[in-house]
Amino acid sequence: MTENLDVGVFRNGEPIPEAKTNDQWEAAYKNEKAAWCYYDNNPSNGKRFGRLYNWYAVNDPRGLAPAGWHVPTDKEWQTLTDQLGGQSVAFSKLKSSSGFFALPGGERYYKDCSFYKIDEIGFWWSATKEDTYNAWYLALHFGLSQVGRDNGGMNTGFAVRCVKNSNTKK
């Protein structure tokens, strides 16, 4: 996809709960439930950056990605970065020339549910879980022109990009 995901329903049509308050965001984490929000709970940020999702929304069996699409795995993110020349040169290509059109949409931080790094860093979930509490993500730091890969708390709110499923039928 060339834009961040901006859906409020799962593939099956059921709503994904919006968490506008810190208490709602934290409750979703404690109950291991899907949630989304706009950066600063401001819908105008959604128009530019899409929505931020916790990892439970990414991993929900009802499907966050539209039909025919999927949330990329950590390996798929790594493959994309490698195909664009590796972490040292992939930033500029992910920012503008590869069709990815990255934007620094920030995050909802897992420790205090506050919003950070808009217009500085873009974060995108992978579908790959690291352990009980963490999953892998891709980050683009616009101030440093760097691509990074790390794992973070499933309560963090990150953007999501989807990858078109390959057609294996002949």
Image (tube, grey):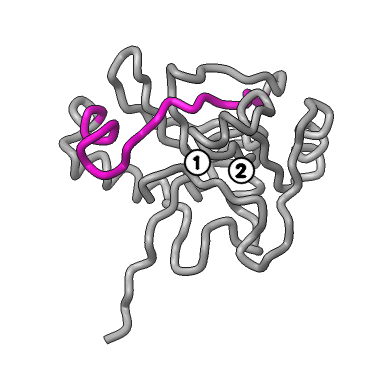
Tell me where residue 140 sits by quadrant.
top left
> What residue is rendered at 58% in x and 41% in y?
131
Q: Position of residue 162 (x, y in %)?
A: 44, 53
Residue 125: mark: 1
**Screen quadrant of the C terminus:** bottom left
- Of residues 47 and 96, the one nearer the viewer is 47
- In the displayed structure, would residue 138 be above or below residue 117? below
**Pointer 2 residue:** 55
Report the side of 110 relative to 27 (left or right).
left
Mark 2 element type: helix
Mark 1 touching mark 2, by CB under 8 A? yes
Tell me where residue 55 sits by quadrant.
top right
Q: Position of residue 129 (x, y in %)?
A: 54, 46
Amino acid type of the residue that numbered disc 2 sits on in the rendered structure: Trp
Tell me where residue 14 sits by quadrant.
bottom right
- In the displayed structure, would residue 137 be above or below residue 113? below
> What residue is rendered at 78% in x and 40% in y?
28
Mark 1 element type: strand
Q: Is residue 6 magenta?
A: no
- Of residues 51 and 35, the one nearer the viewer is 51
Amino acid type of the residue that numbered disc 1 sits on in the rendered structure: Trp
Query: Please, which residue is most extreme toward the bottom here?
Result: 170
Q: Which residues are magenta?
A: 91-110
